[in-house]
Amino acid sequence: MNISAEAAEILEHVGGSSNVSALQHCSTRLRFTLADDSTVDESALKSIPGVLGVVRGPQTQVIVGGRVLEYYRAVEKLRSGSPTAAAAEKTRTPWTVKRVGSKVLDFVVSVFVPIIPAIAGAGIFKSLLVLAAALGWIDRETDSYALISAVPDAVFAFLPLLVAYTTAKKLDVNRPVALGTVALLLFPAFTALVSQEGGTALFGIPVPVVNYNSQVFPAILAVLLLWGTERFFTKFSWPPIRTFFVPLMCYLVVAPATVFLIGPLGFEIGDLFAGVLFNFHNTFGWIAVALLAAILPFLISVGMHKPLLPPTITTMATYGKESFYLTASLAHNISEAGASFAVALRTRNQGLRAIAVSAGFSALFGVTEPALYGVTLQNRRALIAVLAGAITSGAYLGITFVDTFAIVSPGLASISMFIDSLDPWNLIHALIGLVIGLVVSFVVGVVLWKDSDSGTLRVLGQAESQPLDASDDTVSLAIVAPMKGEVVELSSLEDGVFSSGVLGEGVAIRPADGRVVAPVTGTVTSMLDSRHAIGIRTDDGIEVLVHVGMDTVALDGAPFTTHVAQGDRVEAGQPVIDADLDAIRAAGLDTITPVVVVNAAGRDVRFKTGKHIERAAQLIELTTIKETANGTV
């Protein structure tokens, strides 16, 4: 398949670049908004090998299947430079508290998550250097130690620049200009003037004395102001001078505002956040740590642990240590590992055992999502084990005042983050807390576990009381309901692509709420920027598509919050998308959700419609004939 050549044919048969007013794509189709629909050669489009079908309507939709992103990029590459190509208009959706919260969370994640590797690596580097000095391998008083320690110290000193970059990227602001503006706050000549005795002033106006090293909020506020300023002057400036005029005006407006107002305000906001977190921990002590450790599974499952990153980073930058969120995370992470190992020991299901062992080791080293979504959240007995381990471990870590000195997910591999050059017992207490969480969660998990009460095995149809009906020469796969609601036939949908079965066999669900879970265990092969659909491929190559609502690609992702990304490994029943159904309806769109087996050809697909189904209950049974060395049996 030559996608570039086929993209050229598609573009030609919809009337060429000059006829395309806008181009969008969803999970399976190219959506053309055309100036003149009469120029479309439908029969020629359908004759292109990669085109599965064509739908005419307000938009001309060319169905190309799972490689839609490649076709989209190829067509856009051909369209680039066309003076008549216009950006697609975005459908306005009403602002709700949920939508605002989603946007804020998305902004926080986009700004802070990309810098985590940089500061995590620097933090571990610093802790290992402290360990080397404590063991006598290097002398703290030498230039060598000072030079080596400058590597991680520089990362934190210039943290505002890292934040400026990620914020500018998120807001689509000129990144060099953003870095140049924020760099003023760290420029040695500027800091020397401000910090000199008596301070300094600009035209008689005193410059606030603030140390911006390691601060994050001044940079965020500065780039937010730059975003508005850049757009204003871009809109009203003369194009021939825009290249230098817009950056010049941005410097003239944003730099003084940052020095006199935004910078100090951002510093105070950061100090307030850090103080609140610090004081909450000081007020409630070990109870706060134990409580946070216990609720982390639920916070992480919906992505609500991300808002704890900014105050944690600020606390680390302000005090040089953090003893609340990261300490509680150690208790939780290790307890996920212990509970997973307990399930692996007790279950008689080989598939679940393999998942639990893998998830347990991941959690042991600080990565808990496989354990959370694959083992503990779906099985209440395993979740009880996690809570028991997290509370007891968190209580011990809180009572012994364990501090962390690096921002990284705590686990066995990152245990050096607890090294304190002034208190060797800090690391010892962290190790004891680790053992407590691991042992308690493991023991409770071993005592409580029953395969017959396993939510995971019920979802897969493999609990002791509900075996899958599969003969020796067939393999059955249970596809679970991604949403709760009424099951209806695909043929009842107005969208001809789904109702005709062009994309594959399946059903549709008229949802009762907006939570979407993975219908199968596998790898996310498709998660678009519009976030309205997800494609998952199982280890056996079965591809399942969940498309939330009809024509919801037009909403540009506004009503959707995603919990996974393309390429992620997911377990059946794991939350993957949250959809604001009210916002979809307010936009005049249908919320009905098709669930389609894309490559169902040659397989027996069984399902029942006209019934109400609970989320994660078996929806479709797919039976595949096994193959032998001589062919199909």
Image (spheres, rainbow, N blue to C red):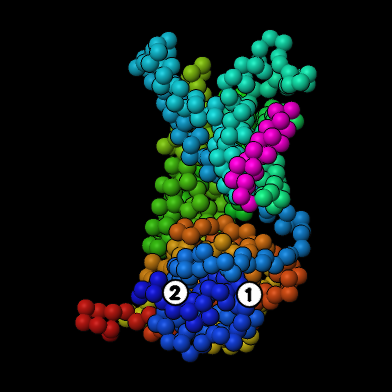
- Amino acid type, callout 1: Asp
Q: Earlier in the sequence, mark 2 or mark 1?
A: 2
Residue 567: quadrant of the picture: bottom left
Q: Which residue is mark 2?
A: 7
Residue at 61% x, 24% y is 319
* Place of residue 277 in the rendered image (x, y in percent of width and height, measured from the top left): 68, 33
Of residue 56 and residue 266, the one placed in the foreground of this image is 56
Q: Quadrant of the C terminus?
A: bottom left
| Numbered disc in front, either 2 or 1 | 2
Q: Amino acid at mark 2?
A: Ala
Q: Is residue 258 magenta?
A: yes
The answer to whether one can see residue 607 in this image is no
The residue located at (56%, 43%) in the rendering is 175
Q: Secondary structure at mark 1?
A: loop
Q: Which residues are magenta?
A: 239-260
Counting from the top left corner in percent of width and height, residue 606 is at 49, 84
In the image, is residue 97 above or below residue 623? above
Answer above or below: position of 120 versus 611: above
Q: Where is residue 212 shown, x and y percent of the image?
A: 63, 26
What residue did someone put label 1 on?
A: 551
Magenta span contains residue 620: no
Distance of label 2 from label 1 (alpha carbons):
22 Å
